[in-house]
Image (cartoon, rainbow, N blue to C red):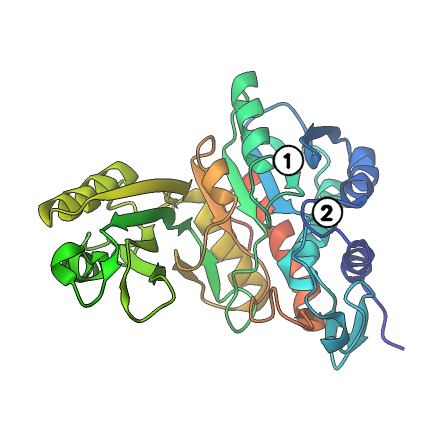
Amino acid sequence: MIRTSRTQALAAELIALDSITPHDKGCQQRLTELLAPLGFVCESIVSNGVTNLWARKGTESPVFVFAGHTDVVPTGPVQQWASEPFTPTVREGKLYGRGAADMKTSIAAMVVACEEFVASHPDHKGSIAFLITSDEEGPATDGTVVVCELLEERGVTLDYCLVGEPTSSHILGDMIKNGRRGSLSGHLVIKGVQGHIAYPHLARNPIHQAAPALAELAAEVWDEGNEYYAPTSWQVSNIHAGAGANNVIPGQLTLEFNFRFSTASTAEGLEARVHAILDHHGLEYDLEWTLSGLPFLTPKGTLSDAVCGAIRAETGVATELSTTGGTSDGRFIARICPQVIEFGPPNASIHKIDEHVELRFIDPLKNIYRRTLENLLTPGLLAA
């Protein structure tokens, strides 16, 4: 009979709680029950129905933070799952369930890593903290950002943060994230004059007017990127015009677009350049902007060395630092913490039907988290 590890059991326990965003369904209470006996002072921070956990052990620097989220995305059609999404199920060497990869296994690994580290190093230097939210998969307005603002108001200083997002590509540890691109969206309405298509001189076609400007926007080189980032990308996600009849020139064109931008650009600079191009083409328009995340970057240094060293010691894998992918709550933490790294299990199944994590990666993930603590919070050089 194959023994279920402590980390796997805790991951399964968390998966069984149907914490679809923004609900926590008791996950953080369970974490509190496990962390408090280790010496963590646990605080529940509730904002507009969103539950957040701030837990800290110790009062000294450096402060190392494990960060993550207990909320998960909806299951999609339950009948398409091979097993119930919130019934953790093991088959063919994998643990299945919504949140298995994103990111309840990471949270379980963090907790067990702390249990082992504190038992072996009761007098470790510095402090360990947890910042856990139930509002990462949703609008992310009442989660990590609220806790970070509160910590900033209190004058709390953070030194290192490890976010448990599923960053690995093929095998555990082959990729970690040392930054993420910013996300800037625009809702553009280009105004024309509606009219009969047989009398174009009495109308003004916004599609025809917009085409040269859109071509210029698509061809624009916004920046060249840098050592860590690919060049900034501008993409149209939706475009609509027309009155529903083929003999009517539309009165307006509506377009949605998005920048995924690097630290080589600023949101203000990108906005100004878009307006300049639209104005150059003489368009009459309204444009609303939504900035959902600023880019952040942790250059190679103490934290990345600690995590990469832990991965190498546990798995022998040479780790790639990457800034690809979507946004994460790291964008909020980076405002108050100079070094933020994301690392977790492979992400191929996240948000999908039959989400899973391979059993062979669960305990090594826990060990890497524990080794990272050893590298940063015990005397001497990086632990072997």
Q: Residue 234: horizontal and vertical position, in percent?
A: 28, 57
Mark 1–mark 2 distance (CA, rounded to whole Å): 11 Å
Residue 273 visible to an observer of this rendering:
yes
Q: Residue 184: horizontal and vertical position, in percent?
A: 36, 46
For the residue pair 293 and 275, the one nearer the viewer reads as 275
Residue 128's disc is 1
For residue 244, above or below residue 307:
below
Q: Residue 93: horizontal and vertical position, in percent?
A: 73, 78
Identify which residue is drawn at 63% across, 58% down: 102
For residue 81, above or below residue 67:
below
Left or right, residue 218 beside residue 370: left
Number of labels in the image equals 2
Looking at the rendered structure, the kind of residue marked 2 is Val
Question: How many neighbours does mark 1 have within 10 angstroms: few (below 14), some (14-19), or many (20 or more)?
Answer: many
* Residue tagged 2: 111
Identify which residue is drawn at 40% across, 59% down: 324
Answer with the quarter of the image where residue 200 lies: bottom left
Left or right, residue 256 beside residue 56: left
Residue furthest to the top in view is 154
Answer with the quarter of the image where residue 314 lies: bottom right
Answer with the quarter of the image where residue 202 lies: bottom left
Circle 1 SS class? strand
Q: Earlier in the sequence, mark 1 or mark 2?
A: 2
Q: The C terminus is located in which quarter?
A: bottom right
For the residue pair 201 and 5, the one nearer the viewer reads as 201
